[in-house]
Structure formats: C-alpha cells, structure tokens
C-alpha cells in the first residue's frame, strides 16, 4: 500500500477554511492535490501523491544518491564485493 | 516521468540480479507485505529473474484482500439504502461479500460511486446535502492520513451527512502475527515503502530485534525492489537483523509527523479481523471518540456479524507464505478473478490474482478452459 | 460542452430549449425536430429524405455491413463527442474489413429534458465528421424516453461499405512470422474521458484520438500491401485486441513493451490512477497484421502519407504460446496478457 507517485509542485493555494491545495504536475498532467499533510512543501519541490493527498516531500539529494548506487550496480562485476 | 523512469533501467536490473545471484549461499524466503510491490514484482517478472535460491513471498499487503467479508457485507447493506450515496475506491467494487458485490448493488439501483480520493466523497456530501454520503475507508497506514484529514475537514464544515465505514488496518501487528507463528518460513521482510513514508520505521526495529529478522524499507519501482531484496540478502549473509532503508528519497525514520499527529487525533487503535487470519489485536483503526459522530456503523446502527470463509480457500496459508497459489487445487479452475473464492484472488494485487494475470498460469488439461480469461 | 464552429441552431431554442417527450411522439413536434435539426444537418449528405428507408445504388463489389451503439459519458470531451465517435466508430469497423465506407444510418434515443442546443451540436459534429470521411448519412430514427431512462442521448449507427478488391482480411489469414503494427500511441481516448471525470488537466490538453481510419487503410491496399488482418483498438485497449486476435487465430502474438508507443500525458495519468495503458480505450487506432516483408512499407506509408508519426512495429506472430498474447516487459521477462473482466477503475493499492 501502495499507489503513490511523485509530482512537482507548481503552485499552492489556501482556501477560506485554511485547507492547502497544490497544483501538482506529473509529466504533462496537472492535478489538484490536498497539501494538508506536507506543510513544509514549497513550489518547485517534488511530493509523493496518494489518493489525492501529498504524503511527503521527495528528498532530492537522496534520490540522486540512490541513482548513484544504481549506476554503480549497472557496472557490477562478479569479482566486486560491494555493500550498501 | 521524473523519479519514476530512472528507477526502471534494465541494465541496473541486470547488475542487481547478478549481485543477488553471487550473494546467496542458501535458500532464502523474502516476504513483501504490500499489494503495490506484489503488482510490480509480477508485472516486471522480478520473481522469475531471481536465482533459484531466492523465493519472494506475497504477504497480507493488500487491504482489499484482508478486509473481512462481514465488513464488505456491511458496505453492501449501506450501499443499497435509498438515501445513501456510497463512495469507495475502485479496488473494492468487485470484492464479493457473502452474496453480492458493489457492482451488483449498483446494477440493482444503489448509488455507488468510485472515487480517486476521500475528498471526492467529501465534495459529494457537500453537493448533496439532502443525502447521506458514506465513504468506505479501507487502507493501510498509507491511506489513513488522507482519510483522517477528510473526516477532520468534514467536522470543520459541520457536515451532518458525511460518515465513513472504517476498514483501516495496520501492518506491523500483522507482521508480528506472522513472525510469531511456529511454522513461519520468512527469512526477511521488505517493509512497505509508502506505509513507512507515513509512519516511519522505528516500530519495525523492535520486530527485527525480537524475531532476529532483517527488515528493509523498500520502494515500488523494479530497481527499488531489487535494491530492497539485495539489502535483505546482504544482512542475511552477514548474520545481521536490522531495519534499513532502501527508499530514502521517500521515507525518513520518523515518517511524516503531521500525518501521524492527524491519525492519532482522528483515529484510535482497535482489534481488527483480517480475512484469512482472524482477529489480530490492535491491528486496525476506528474513529476516536472525538470524531465518533462520523462513524457510519454508529450512525446507521450497523450489525457486523462475522462470517465463515469458504472451506476450499487457502488464502490464509498463502498470505502467511506457507503455500503458493499453484498449491491450491482451485486456482485457475473454480477460483479465478471472475469468480474468486477468497481474499487473494479478489483484488488484482492479491497473490493469486497477480499470479493469474501475469502469467503463472493454471495447469491446463483437455477438460479445462485454459485459464485464458 | 463543445460549440466548436457550428452554425446556429435553426430550431428556435427559446421555444424548445429542452427536448420533450412529444418530440419523439410521431406528431408535429417530432417532424419539426427531425426537419430542423437532423435533415438540416444531414441534408447535403443524404441521398433521399422524407422516406422510411433510403434507396441506394448497388455498388460494384461485395457489401460489408456493421452496427454499433454509442453511450459515452461525458457526451463531449477533448477531441470529440458522441456524434463524431458514432460516425468514426462505424466507419472504422467497415475499414477493418477492408471495405470502403459508403452509407450510415443513425438512430437517436434522447432523454426527455436534454438540451436542444447540445443535440444540435452533436448533429453538426456528425455532419462535419461524415463529410470529412466522405460518407453519407442516409436514413435515421428518433425516439425520446422519459427523464431518468436515458443518459442524455444514446446513438446507434449502422454502416454499409463495399469491398471492391478481391481481398480477405480476417484473423484466419494471420500467419506465423507476421508483424504487428499499431498506427500510433495508445490510450488517448480513455485518458481524455478520464480527464473529464477525474478533474485532470493536461498542458497541452490530451485529446481523444477519435478519427476515421479508412483512408489510411485504403492507402495500404492501393499500394498493394498484403494485409492479413486489421482490428481497431477500442474499449479494452490494445491488450484486449491482442488477446482477441490470438484466441480467434489460435496463434501466439508477442509484443515488446518498450516499443509500444505511449505519450507522456497518458503515461502520467495511468501512473496516477493505477491504470495500465495497454487496456485504455482508443478510438483512432488500429493494429495491422502483415507479412514480415511488408512491415517497413506499412510503417512508412502510415507515417509519411497520413502523418501517423508514432506508428510502430511492436511485435510478431510466433509459433509458440498458441492462442495467447504475450508481452515482453522492460526487464525482458515475458508474461501472458489477460483480458480484464471489466473496465479499469482508479485504485489506491
């Protein structure tokens, strides 16, 4: 559990009841998403969206690090001893 | 798409498969407890790419599969009432109760609507003040904060025509339930990444220590899952049993504090029956006293009577990892996605449905339709 | 709602802004409706009017016939409406037999209370689509049902076409070694519909791929391409079509996921809602099964003459896995494609 995908925050609004909603871009698609759970999210950051709610802000530095591990793994050689 | 496509690179996958094959020195069974991970494993064939020593087990990770029949019957009863608009995630529409499913209720005239988000249900309530709107709140901890926020917003708006039927469940108690069984065959766990996005993973540390089992927080793209499997195997091969995080871009150890606070405010922990397992203490969420007015069971005075399962269904054993779908004589024959006998065939993420759909086909004989549809 | 560039409705809308039961009653009101909306819309397309049936010259060749009913919701969506769908869908069914579409009949079932202006727009859309496709709407029928017993409007179209050449295009002609070609990226129609239903917006907008395909097919046939089978991809998407063809032909159809064209917007919407683009509806896409030697030519013709830039050779017909459609995934693992029991619904799990 489960289906949540990352999207970029294009804009954040607050309605008259103080509910924050964000315009989130996924590829070429834009959807309005409830931002109640991510008070720290800012325009330009990436959030993970599930069932119409942003659940968390994506840690872009960690994402890059992970891709770095992956790039190393693509070069994996049987003689390597690699740990994480 | 950014933060998705990069995690599907086939050359990296090849590297991981080689690394995993080199690492493993004896048979290992790794269980995931998340329907989304089951889906990804089956879709990309990760289980078939594993070396023969590594078996991937599909645990009770699908809230659709584990929702007990009696709650589905309650949902069906509510949905059939004239004054009710019943809103649900699409996942639940085809799940059969004792006699019918929500599709049939809709066909018989019930106002049943699928929604992408609980806020869609809230908007429906605002737009239809003269009708009662009930939202079927299924899900693990991933969905709990969304459901909590929606109920909270309903209260802010002083809505008197919105309520939820809670079928929320919690993962760590189910994992403990599996681990405490004497015949538990699981060597390591992939913890559900998006559950941990919300809750963090401190709760898993006690489990890892108590049961001497590695638990790795894992994401959903094929490379994330391969990484999670690799990290579990590394721990097993070096005799460690810790919690580590293979999904740090989306999960922090403390989780999402705002989300957890909201869950604690709106919900309280309760015992919950799991389909295939029976009652697991403290494994579910229901509305707290403060929000009890929004409980559909109270509002509609719903009787929820436990129901006995089909004797032929072995989904409990499959969910525990003791059997696979192929071990079931009914798989692909009397039990298919079109007429499921139990939990694991009911949802497309259930282990049996996933096997069926992604090509682990039923054995064919001349008298058998061939499992094609 | 889609006004496009339609001329104004001549039926005085202020007098009858909504369709009444009487408009289907067979009396004066119904005749006014037919004359002012349908005959006006289809007049220069119809060969006869005012009769219960159309008298048509017999074409040279074998006759192909098809029918389909259209119940799409919403009635208007980016890239089309129920009217353009009703023309294209039936034209395409004829084209998939290798026939040149000639004539359509159209039957309307209208719900009492439906806005007259919208009915006019639908009729105009059908007129424009039929004219662009070169087909004639020659006869029709109108019924009105009580409010609550119809979803705005339902349309049935039946179509007649001609096979001038002595060709046989059908699943039984599929052979091992044939290539499978799709004429463009998949999933646009279903995504456009879903966008309206789920409040998704796309920048730029995703439009339904609703289009008449017969001219593209005619180009292939005119160029002498040996076409074994054609099938348009509609509800249930590419996946369902592949399963159907595999089951009917009894052969194995194998496609490669990494070359199946899917545009970014469709991909994004599917990721969000948990859909598989392979099962998402299309209304302007077809699969062509042709001998291996013809594949490049087919792709060339479709890309250059008909602007189908995303046309792709996605797989082939194999001797193993008889009666099954299979797909090789991103990581190289082959899996069997199943038919879904119903339509995909947005999921959280």
Image (cartoon, rainbow, N blue to C red):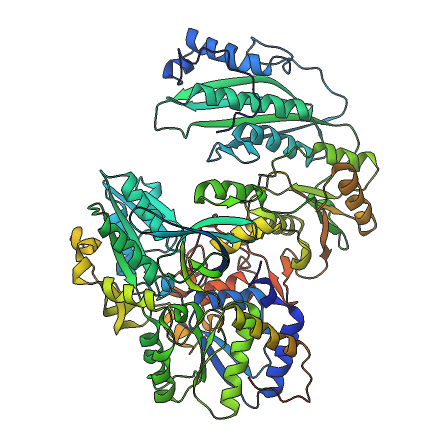
Residue drawn 78% across the image and 37% down it:
C305
Work out whether A60 lies above or below C188: below
Q: Is residue B355 left or right of residue A33?
A: right
Q: How many marks?
A: 0
In the picture, which quadrant includes the N terminus of chain B? bottom right
Q: Is residue B128 left or right of residue A32?
A: left
Residue drawn 28% across the image and 63% down it:
B262
Residue extending farthest bottom: B239
Confirm whether residue B261 shows in the render.
Answer: yes
Q: Nearer the viewer, residue B58 or B194?
A: B194
Quadrant in the picture for residue B15? bottom right
Confirm whether residue B342 shows in the render.
Answer: no
Q: How far from the left and from the top, in percent, is residue B97?
A: 31, 56
Q: How far from the left and from the top, in percent, is residue C15?
A: 39, 10
Residue extending farthest top: C28
Q: Nearer the viewer, residue C337 or C76?
A: C76
Q: How far from the left and from the top, in percent, is residue B106?
A: 34, 43
Quadrant in the picture for residue C288? top right
Q: How far from the left and from the top, in percent, is residue A40?
A: 40, 63
Work out whether C224 lies above or below C19: below
Quadrant in the picture for residue C143? top left
Work out whether C312 lies above or below C146: below
């Amino acid at each position: 559990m489960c289906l949540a995908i990352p999207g970029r925050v294009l804009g954040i609004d607050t309605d008259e009841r103080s509910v924050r909603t964000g315009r989130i871009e996924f590829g070429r698609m834009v959807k309005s998403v409830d931002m109640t759970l991510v008070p720290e999210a800012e325009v330009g950051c990436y959030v993970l969206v599930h069932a119409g709610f942003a659940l968390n802000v994506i840690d872009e530095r960690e994402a890059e690090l992970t891709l770095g591990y992956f790039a190393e793994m693509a070069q994996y050689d049987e003689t390597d001893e690699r740990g994480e | 798409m950014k933060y998705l496509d990069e995690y599907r690179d086939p050359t990296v996958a090849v590297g991981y498969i080689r690394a995993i094959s080199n690492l493993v020195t004896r048979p290992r069974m790794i269980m995931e407890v998340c329907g989304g991970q089951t889906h990804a494993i089956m879709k990309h064939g990760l289980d078939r790419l594993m070396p023969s020593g590594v078996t991937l087990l599909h645990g009770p990770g699908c809230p659709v599969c584990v929702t007990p029949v009696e709650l589905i019957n309650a949902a069906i009863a509510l949905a059939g009432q004239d004054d009710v608009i019943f809103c649900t995630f699409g996942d639940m529409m085809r799940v059969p109760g004792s006699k019918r499913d929500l599709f049939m209720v809709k066909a018989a005239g019930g106002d049943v609507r699928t929604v992408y988000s609980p806020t869609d249900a809230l908007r429906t309530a605002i737009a239809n003040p003269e009708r009662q709107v009930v939202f079927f709140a299924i899900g693990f901890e991933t969905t709990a904060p969304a459901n909590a926020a929606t109920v909270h917003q309903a209260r802010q708006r002083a809505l008197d025509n919105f309520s939820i039927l809670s079928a929320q469940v919690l993962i760590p108690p189910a994992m403990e339930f599996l681990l405490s069984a004497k015949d538990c065959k699981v060597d390591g766990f992939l913890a559900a990444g998006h559950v941990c996005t919300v809750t963090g993973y401190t709760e898993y540390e006690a489990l890892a220590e108590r049961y001497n089992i590695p638990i790795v927080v894992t994401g959903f793209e094929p490379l994330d899952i391969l990484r999670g499997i690799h990290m579990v195997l590394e721990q097993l091969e070096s005799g460690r049993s810790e919690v580590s995080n293979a999904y740090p871009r989306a999960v922090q150890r403390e989780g999402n504090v705002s989300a957890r606070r909201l869950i604690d405010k709106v919900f309280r922990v309760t015992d919950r029956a799991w389909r295939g397992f029976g009652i697991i203490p403290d494994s579910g969420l229901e509305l707290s006293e403060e929000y009890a007015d929004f409980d559909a069971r109270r509002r509609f005075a719903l009787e929820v009577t436990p129901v006995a399962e089909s004797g032929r269904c072995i989904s409990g054993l499959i969910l525990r990892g003791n059997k696979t779908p192929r071990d079931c004589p009914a798989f692909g024959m009397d039990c298919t996605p079109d007429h499921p006998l139990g939990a694991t065939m009911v949802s497309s993420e259930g282990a049996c449905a996933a096997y069926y759909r992604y090509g682990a086909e039923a054995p064919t004989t001349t008298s058998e339709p061939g499992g094609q549809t | 709602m889609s006004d496009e560039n339609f001329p104004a409705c001549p039926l005085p809308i202020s007098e009858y802004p909504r369709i009444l039961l009487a408009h289907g009653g067979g009396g004066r009101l119904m005749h006014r409706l037919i004359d002012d909306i349908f005959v006006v819309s289809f007049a220069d397309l119809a060969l006869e009017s005012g009769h219960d049936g159309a008298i048509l010259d017999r074409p040279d060749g074998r006759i192909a016939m098809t029918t389909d009913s259209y119940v799409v919701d919403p009635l208007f969506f980016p890239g089309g409406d129920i009217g353009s769908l009703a023309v294209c869908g039936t034209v395409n069914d004829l084209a998939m037999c290798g026939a040149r579409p000639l004539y359509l009949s159209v039957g309307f079932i209208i719900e009492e209370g439906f806005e007259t202006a919208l009915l006019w727009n639908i009729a105009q859309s059908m007129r424009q689509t039929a004219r662009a496709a070169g087909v004639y709407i020659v006869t029709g029928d109108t019924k009105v049902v009580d409010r609550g017993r119809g979803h705005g409007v339902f349309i049935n179209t039946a179509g007649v076409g001609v096979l001038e050449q002595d060709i046989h295009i059908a699943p039984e002609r599929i052979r091992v070694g044939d290539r499978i070609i799709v004429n463009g990226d998949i999933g646009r129609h279903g995504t456009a519909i879903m966008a309206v239903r789920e409040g998704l917006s796309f920048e730029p907008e995703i439009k339904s791929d609703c289009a008449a395909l017969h001219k593209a097919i005619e180009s292939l046939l005119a160029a002498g391409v040996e076409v074994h089978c054609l099938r348009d991809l509609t509800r249930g998407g590419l996946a369902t079509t592949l399963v159907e063809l595999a089951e009917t032909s009894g052969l194995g159809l194998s496609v490669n996921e990494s070359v199946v064209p899917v545009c970014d917007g469709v991909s994004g919407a599917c990721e969000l809602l948990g859909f598989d683009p392979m099962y998402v509806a299309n209304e302007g896409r077809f699969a062509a099964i042709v001998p291996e030697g013809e594949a490049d030519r087919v792709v060339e013709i479709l890309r250059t003459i008909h602007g189908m830039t995303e046309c792709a050779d996605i797989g082939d017909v194999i001797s193993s896995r008889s009666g099954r459609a299979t797909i090789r995934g991103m990581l190289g693992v082959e899996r069997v494609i199943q038919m879904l029991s119903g339509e995909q619904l947005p999921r959280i799990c």
